[in-house]
Amino acid sequence: MIGFLNIDKPQAMTSHDVVNIVRRVAGTRKVGHAGTLDPLATGVLIVGVNRATRLIEYIVGQPKIYLTTVRLGQTTNTYDADGEIEQERPVSVSDADLAMALEQFKGEIEQIPPMFSAIKQGGKPLYLLARKGKEVEREARRVEIDQLEVVARHENDVTLRIGCSTGTYIRSLAHDLGEVLGCGGHVLTLRRERVGGFSAETATPLRDLTPESIASKLHPLDIAVGHLPRLDADEDESSMLRVGKQIERRADLGPLATAYANDGTFLGILRERGENWQPHKLFV
């Protein structure tokens, strides 16, 4: 049983909770997820089973799309609705004000992660410090937001669709947007709609995952690396790669490429090494 599951994570459950359930259903300990979702969040959570965990890193870095509702007028200590309300302010924000404020967050921006996050500082996750009421300086991170649009607005609740790079904190975006507008804000709801080629429309509800159905819901290994250039090896090259030998680099595809045998079998990932291709991660 090898491959990737596109799970629709339910609310009020951690990503690790989902991993534990998949371990029980799949009957294996070798399970990992590609990108944490907060307990409040729902949507696409990609889970690798057995040898698929070796390719999780190639999914984590793919762009993501979120649908979030931001409640203006309130700030919380976690930047979302699971936290305690710290401040309430009046909201006097027109649609034009909102549109102007959103423009400041498009493109490449610097973002400070929230205190309630798993980022480690001094060897300890920030959320452990936050739970003790401590706040420390966090280093700003560069992220890219290439889609940021208003989907709906009802009084002080604004629903946004956000397309962004990996590492983007939607909670920080909601908080920072509220500060720019002068009224504060936090995430009320959050749904991850897409990770690379995986979408929420085709995700499997966690409740539908059973020992009898899991095999039919697994996606093949190479779905994780479909964004890499492809090399179709001939019979001799396939034989050499299968035993870990290098082959001549007959195409300039970049530093990494996927390799397929002449019968279409996915062989693995190759790494450029001088004039050759060197097997990097093989699955045959």
Image (spheres, rainbow, N blue to C red):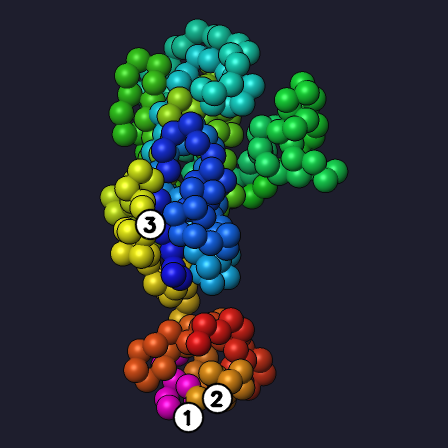
Image location of residue 203, percent across then percent down: 29, 45
Task: Check disc 3: other Cα within 10 Å, few if <14, some if 14-19, many if 20+.
Answer: few
Q: Give the range drawn in magenta.
A: 231-238
Q: Residue at x 53, y 82 (%)?
A: 244
Name the residue carrying label 1.
Answer: 236
Image location of residue 38, percent across then percent down: 47, 33
Q: Which residue is farthest left?
A: 201
Q: Can residue 179 be seen in this view?
A: no
Residue type, numbered disc 1: Asp
Which of the 4 quarters of the picture holds residue 136?
top right
Q: In this view, does 64 lie to the left or right of 179?
A: left
Q: Distance between the residues labelled 3 and 2?
A: 37 Å
Q: Distance between the residues labelled 2 and 1?
A: 6 Å
Q: Which residue is drawn at 43% across and 46% down?
A: 24
Q: In the rendered structure, are the residues bearing label 2 and label 1 in contact, judged by CB atoms less than 8 Å apart?
A: yes
Image location of residue 98, percent across then percent down: 37, 23
For label 2, the SS is: helix
Q: Distance between the residues labelled 1 and 3?
A: 40 Å
* Lower position in the chain sequence, tag 3 or tag 2: 3
Residue type, numbered disc 2: Met
Q: Is residue 17 visible?
A: yes
Q: Quadrant of the C terminus?
A: bottom left
* Lower position in the chain sequence, tag 1 or tag 3: 3
Residue type, numbered disc 3: Pro
Q: How many numbered marks does the figure carry?
A: 3
- Vertical side of 59 occupied by 168: above or below: above
- Vertical side of 160 occupied by 208: above or below: below
For label 1, the SS is: helix
Name the residue carrying label 3.
Answer: 211
Query: Which circle, 1 or 3, is nearer the viewer?
Result: 3
Name the residue carrying label 2.
Answer: 240
- Vertical side of 283 occupied by 114: above or below: above
